[in-house]
């Protein structure tokens, strides 16, 4: 697992959030290179930005140094000089908020690159929600391997030739699947801050009326309640995950827990249609009848998708070895 925060004396020691060796937080004089590989990721505390990195680290067998893509411009003078290869991903790094990073990367990165476990974002009511297609295509043309998590992303950027496969999170989560709570009785709402407050509260009320014990998470790790706390106290006791954000469905899939997805973002629909092990609820009013009849989960499908993700991981590991010998 990534480094725990160690900033601020005892306060840092008590911080329960997962943290990686992120060089973007430091001035160049204090940066210490620990790996020949740099990985670009989002350091926003939504756990969906961290579990794919943990999955990638697990498949590689080591921890690349990292750079937070929100810290732009990237110090490519330092990176091009000190590293031998770069990984972009995982998570939804193709949302338009990351346009400055992709433009900077296209112009200044001189390293061999791969993109791994990334996806677009297609929320309701938003026009042009993704990074500029021309910029992404130029970067993809320079990548030796490209792995995106759904056909929606591949088709949007005009790259049907790329690897399409499940998020690396599933590889990481698989180690916890055998140790779910023995008496799983709760329903977990994995909510999304992009969903209007009124809609989120309507979902919460519908779940509370079901008679099942209900727990809610926004999937955001905090200093006193980190990623592993969310996993242990929210996901592992759940008999069913109701999610309006993608990583609720991805983590549920990886753990073998059925899910009901409310697709306010089309990437949730794309995930369910490709990978299964859950169902879609188009309207909040559908929830009551779905809660007592949990979707069927196929252990074989989960294993199949995990193995496919591991197979891509083996390709990535061979690629990195070829550039770091």
Image: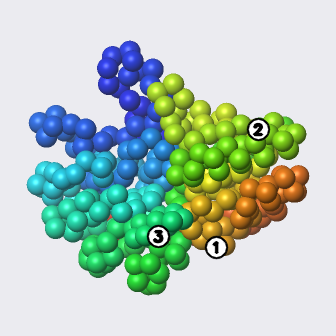
Q: Looking at the picture, how far across and down is residue 276, in whole percent?
A: 70, 68
Tell me the residue that label 3 is attached to.
Answer: 148
Closer to the camera, 23 or 129? Answer: 129
**Picture quarter containing residue 40?**
bottom left
Q: Could you classify mark 3 by the number of other residues whose Cα lies within 10 Å: few (under 14), some (14-19), or many (20 or more)?
A: many
Mark 2 or mark 1, which has the lower sequence index? 2
Image coordinates for residue 235, horizontal then vertical, percent? 68, 42
- Name the N-terminal-most of marks 1 and 3: 3
3D distance between C-alphas at marks 2 and 3: 33 Å
Left or right relative to 89: residue 259: right
Mark 3 residue element: strand
Image quarter for residue 264? bottom right
Residue 36 shows in this picture: yes
Asked if the residues shown at circle 2 and circle 3 are in contact, with their CB atoms under 8 angstroms apart, the answer is no
Residue drawn where x is 18% and y is 53% of the image: 73
Q: CA distance from mark 1 to mark 3?
A: 13 Å
Percent coordinates x, y for residue 34 in the rendering? 27, 43
Structure colour scheme: rainbow
Q: Which residue is mark 2?
A: 214
Using the rendered image of the protein, determine whether residue 318 is visible from the camera's viewpoint: no
Report the disc number at residue 274.
Answer: 1
Q: Is residue 234 above or below residue 55?
A: above
Within 10 Å of disc 2 (Cα), the crowding (few <14, some 14-19, many 20+) is: some
Q: Is residue 309 above or below residue 180?
A: below
* Nearer-N-terminus badge (2/3): 3
Q: Secondary structure at mark 1?
A: helix
């Amino acid at each position: 697992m990534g480094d725990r925060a160690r900033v601020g004396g005892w306060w840092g020691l008590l911080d329960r959030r997962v943290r990686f060796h992120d060089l973007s937080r430091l001035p160049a004089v204090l940066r210490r290179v620990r790996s020949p590989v740099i990985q670009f990721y989002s350091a926003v505390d939504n756990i969906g930005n961290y579990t794919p990195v943990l999955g990638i680290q697990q498949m590689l067998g080591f921890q690349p140094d990292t750079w937070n893509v929100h810290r732009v411009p990237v110090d490519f003078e330092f990176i091009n000089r000190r590293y031998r290869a770069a990984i972009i991903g995982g998570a939804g790094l193709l949302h338009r908020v990351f346009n400055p990073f992709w433009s900077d990367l296209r112009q200044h990165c001189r390293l061999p690159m791969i993109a791994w476990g990334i996806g677009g974002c297609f929320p309701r009511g938003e026009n042009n929600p993704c990074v500029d297609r021309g910029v992404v295509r130029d970067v993809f043309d320079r990548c030796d391997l490209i792995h995106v998590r759904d056909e929606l992303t591949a088709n949007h950027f005009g790259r049907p030739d790329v690897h399409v496969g499940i998020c690396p999170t599933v590889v990481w989560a698989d180690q916890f699947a055998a140790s779910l709570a023995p008496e799983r009785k709760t329903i977990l709402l994995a909510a999304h801050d992009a969903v209007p407050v009124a809609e989120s509260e309507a979902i919460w009320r519908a779940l509370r009326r079901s008679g099942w014990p209900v727990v809610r998470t926004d999937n955001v790790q905090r200093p006193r309640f980190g990623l592993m706390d969310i996993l242990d106290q929210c996901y592992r006791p759940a008999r069913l995950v109701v999610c309006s954000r993608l990583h609720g469905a991805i983590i549920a899939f990886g753990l073998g827990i059925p899910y009901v997805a409310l697709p306010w973002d089309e990437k949730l629909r794309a995930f369910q249609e490709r990978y299964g092990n859950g169902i879609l609820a188009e309207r909040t009013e559908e929830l009551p009848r779905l809660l007592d009849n949990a979707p069927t989960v196929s252990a074989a499908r989960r294993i199949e998708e995990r193995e496919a993700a591991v197979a891509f991981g083996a390709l990535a590991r061979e690629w990195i070895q070829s550039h770091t010998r």
